[in-house]
Amino acid sequence: MKWFWNSNNFKPKLSSNNPIQNLRAMNRIFINLLVFLSLFPSLSAKQIKLLTIGNSFSQDAVEQYLYELADANGDTIIIGNMYIGGCSLERHYRNSMSNSADYSYRKITDGEKVTSDKYTLKEALENEKWDYVSFQQVSQNSGMYETYFPYIDSLILYVRKHTDNPNLKIILHSTWAYSQSSTHSGFANYNSSQLTMYQAIVETTKQVAEKTNAKFIVPSGTAIQNGRTSSLGDTFCRDGYHLELTYGRYTAACTWFEKLFGISAIGSKYFPDTITPFQAKIAQYAAHYACRNPLTITSLANLRE
């Protein structure tokens, strides 16, 4: 459709003797202006392409609810997740060196997820002109600085070699600590203490981001820890380490949304119909305060419906 500007459409024909006629003329101007503006997308809307190189924790965080949050705000996001369950940075590195087709590539476009098996990192990197590529460590090692290197440095070089966006931004996903009652064997790395694990993850990802010059950190772990201070308590994991499927995953998605789009998650127009408005409120506040204060826990104990 072509729009031809005609200034006559917007010139009021006013009469000093007929106020009703003048009002009608002004109404026509207003209607014509609305029609004109409707032909153009919002100038403030963002379009983002995100690829996460992760595991089940990236699946929990970005494969559900993130697209809907962006869409409800008038923004657009294409999400790719290179998934191998329990995959460490070391394994991602070895896969890149061998061009291993071990991945399940989950791609969300226009809200529809398509899964392609036997995918390589190179294929995924070349599949879109990505704006952001995210890395995270396997959960049991996420608070152990020495496990990130030299693998993440090599992976970043590999990513930049196989992407054609000179403005590509590398980001880190700071994941969550396990539930207090978790029986995951890796919990022993942190003396089976949730708070010890949380603090180790926060400090480690901060140091790794500084060393690798990552653009920013997505503080999902702090958001989940914030949520645990609310009336929902320590219920944000479904099995001791993976996120609860509704408000748990929604909390992480809100955190990603706010960091990527720079818009407060509080008051978002979207939340899944599987959670209550109050659970949505907790998730949104937990995410927002995590983005504002990513290195410290913000109590939501006084948050009310």
Image (spheres, grey):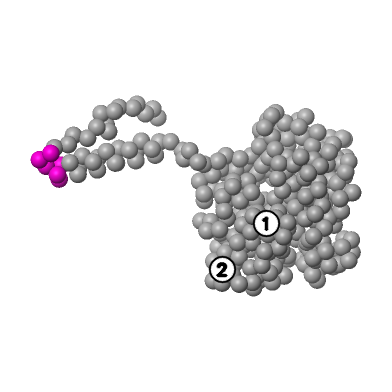
Q: Is residue 114 left or right of residue 200?
A: left
Instruction: Using the rendered image of the protein, determine whether residue 244 is visible from the camera's viewpoint.
Output: no
Instruction: Using the rendered image of the protein, determine whether residue 113 is visible from the camera's viewpoint.
Output: yes
Instruction: Name the residue type under label 1.
Output: Asn
Query: Magenta residues?
Result: 16-21
Query: Closer to the camera: disc 2 or disc 1?
Result: 1
Q: Residue at x 47, y 40 (%)?
A: 42
Do labels 2 and 1 touch, CB within 8 Å? no
What's the CA distance linking mark 2 and mark 1? 22 Å
Instruction: Name the residue type under label 2.
Output: Phe
Q: Quadrant of residue 150?
A: top right
- Residue nearest the viewer, comparing 265 with 209: 209
Indicate the quadrant containing the N terminus: top left, top right, bottom left or bottom right.
Answer: top left
- Element on which disc 1 rests: loop
Looking at the picture, does residue 63 appear above or below residue 30?
below
- Residue nearest the viewer, comparing 197 with 124: 197
Tag on residue 278?
Answer: 2
Looking at the picture, does residue 21 appear above or below residue 183?
above
User: For mark 1, what is the residue?
Assistant: 293
